[in-house]
Amino acid sequence: MKNILYFLFVVYATTTIYAQSKINVFLTPSDSLNKPRRNALVITEASAIGLSLVGLNQLWYADYENSKLHTLNDNDEWLQMDKFGHVFSSYQVGRVGADLLKWSGVRKKDQILYGATLGFGFLTVVEVFDGYSKEWGFSWGDMLSNAAGTGLYIGQELLWQEQRVTLKYSFHQTKYASQRSDKLGEGLLEEMLKDYNGQTYWLSANVHSFLKIEKIPKWLNLAFGYGAHGMLTGTNETTADVFIPQDRIRQYYLSLDIDFSRIKTNSHILKSVFSVLNVIKVPFPTLEINNKNKIKFHTIYF
């Protein structure tokens, strides 16, 4: 899935900033504007984004014919799993952008204005790329999803000055990828990006921040997930290379989770590790309800 691939690239690019000598001191956020950090960050981000767009154009779009800018209504495809992917990617890239500006000592207003909007801006450029490719098209549904992810981050910062609800991702391999590996991926890494049947997107809400009950661990979250399976094509249509009937099912989940950012530590190395881990929903016992009116309990759900 392209939008998760973009997110992973940005995470990789930004984490290389942290891999320096005297790591803990280096990772400590500045309490005032640190111009060398800010300037280095701007140059690094601009270079990483520029290189990623050039690489994306060569690796993803070069094999397909160009066209005039055109739109595509794909809102009914993949049971909207791709749209949840866009919300997730925009939120997480914006979170990383804001955190890096905080590390540079940039004031809160600019963290939100220039950092939290990083995901929306980047994915907008990618959407324009799609619009000039005959294989895809500019999707207003994707743009709305990108805006929703960015809005979720910014809205919470303005309302609560913290992220009480985070967006997370989990994945498990399914039988569907082997049935159509050209679209759903071949091998774990490709399947994590492309196989919507194995992806789950979560709204993970911190219990203590809402209820303010001291006995509740500050890192404990309640997570609400959405997934789908039985999909071999975007819509419920068969093609010449798909012979197995599709039983497309929406799945809704209720589970527990951990907010690693709320685990107390004085180590900024651990805080950085926790920030990366906070992207992934922690496997826990999970209750599933699907649109076939079936209820299922998973001892551990990935």
Image (tube, rainbow, N blue to C red):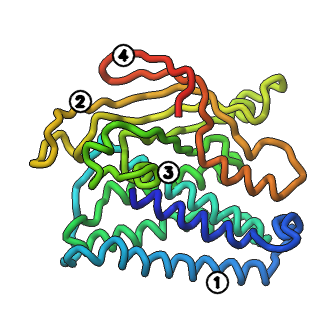
**Kind of element beneath mark 1:** helix
Q: Position of residue 41 (x, y in %)?
A: 69, 77
Whole-angstrom CA distance, mark 1 to mark 3, is 25 Å
Whole-angstrom CA distance, mark 3 to mark 2, is 26 Å
Residue type, numbered disc 4? Lys
Q: Are marks 3 and 2 in contact (CB under 8 Å)?
A: no
**Kind of element beneath mark 3:** helix
Q: Is residue 68 above or below residue 219?
A: below
Residue type, numbered disc 1? Ile
Task: Classify residue 74 as left or right of residue 5.
Answer: left
Name the residue located 50 percent from the left edge and 81 percent from the top edge. Answer: 50
Name the residue located 36 percent from the left edge and 35 percent from the top edge. Answer: 228
Residue holding disc 4: 294
Which one is earlier in the sequence, the residue at label 2 or at label 4? 2
Q: Which mark is residue 247?
A: 2
Which one is earlier in the sequence, the residue at label 4 or at label 3? 3
Residue holding disc 3: 88
Residue holding disc 1: 43
**Kind of element beneath mark 4:** loop
